[in-house]
């Protein structure tokens, strides 16, 4: 099933390394995106490794703002500190380089959320921004159409900082 045990161990350590470097709870989807964009591990093997790391208590699944997130556990940090030297320099460099370019996008996606639900004939849009686990804004809007709901979510995800600042100014001004 696995190429060899050294490769298996390196791949699992690489996952722990990525979780340690990101330093934030991350969704399975976002972690999968990071792994697949760099061609480190295929999707099915990645999901198997995550399950095995969770069973060994090297990672934890937590719920944050109603969403499941993955974090490295204390036990995982210990294993990484003991065996992290088994990760190839080229893979560590690839991760470091990728995260250097993408960390702001990853953090933004983790701390900014926008979704909507249907209630009767209306759509309830929930726009949220977090900073260091503190809620900056949690705004719910009632809109009439699916298109409006999608548009609000898209604008919030792409420009939340400016929108938040503008809203804050409007509310503070006399």
Image (tube, rainbow, N blue to C red):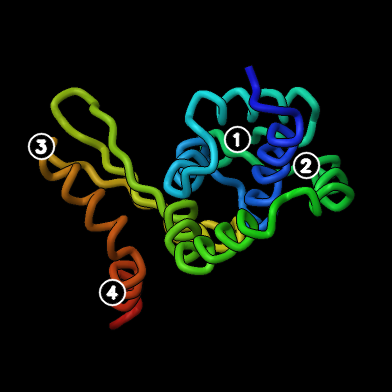
Answer whether labels 3 and 1 touch (C-beta < 8 Å): no
Residue 117, horizontal then vertical, whole percent = 28, 31
Q: Earlier in the sequence, mark 3 or mark 1?
A: 1
Mark 4 — residue?
A: 166
Mark 1 — residue?
A: 63
Mark 3 — residue?
A: 145
Mark 2 — residue?
A: 73
Instruction: Look at discs 2 and 1 and give the one toward the viewer.
Output: 2
Front residue of 29/151: it is 29
Residue 6, horizontal then vertical, whole percent = 75, 35
Whole-angstrom CA distance, mark 3 to mark 1, is: 30 Å
Q: Earlier in the sequence, mark 4 or mark 2?
A: 2
Q: Earlier in the sequence, mark 3 or mark 4?
A: 3
**Helix, strand or loop at mark 3:** loop
Q: Is residue 93 above or below residue 6?
A: below
Q: Is residue 166 above or below residue 136?
A: below
Whole-angstrom CA distance, mark 4 to mark 2, is: 39 Å
Name the residue: 47% across, 49% down: 38
């Amino acid at each position: 099933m696995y190429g060899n045990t050294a490769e298996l161990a390196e791949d699992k350590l690489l996952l722990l390394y990525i979780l340690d470097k990101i330093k934030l709870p991350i969704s399975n989807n976002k972690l999968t995106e990071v792994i697949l964009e760099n061609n480190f591990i295929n999707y099915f093997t990645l999901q198997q490794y995550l399950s095995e790391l969770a069973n060994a208590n090297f990672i934890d699944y937590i719920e944050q703002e109603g969403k499941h997130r993955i974090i490295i556990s204390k036990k995982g940090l210990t294993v990484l500190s003991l065996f992290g030297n088994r990760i190839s320099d080229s893979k560590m460099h690839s991760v470091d380089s990728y995260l250097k370019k993408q960390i702001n996008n990853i953090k933004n996606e983790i701390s900014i959320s926008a979704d909507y639900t249907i209630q009767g004939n209306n759509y309830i849009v929930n726009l949220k921004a977090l900073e260091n686990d503190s809620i900056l804004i949690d705004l719910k809007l009632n809109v009439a159409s699916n298109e409006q709901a999608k548009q609000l979510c898209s604008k919030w995800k792409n420009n939340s900082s400016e929108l938040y600042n503008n809203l804050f100014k409007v509310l503070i001004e006399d």
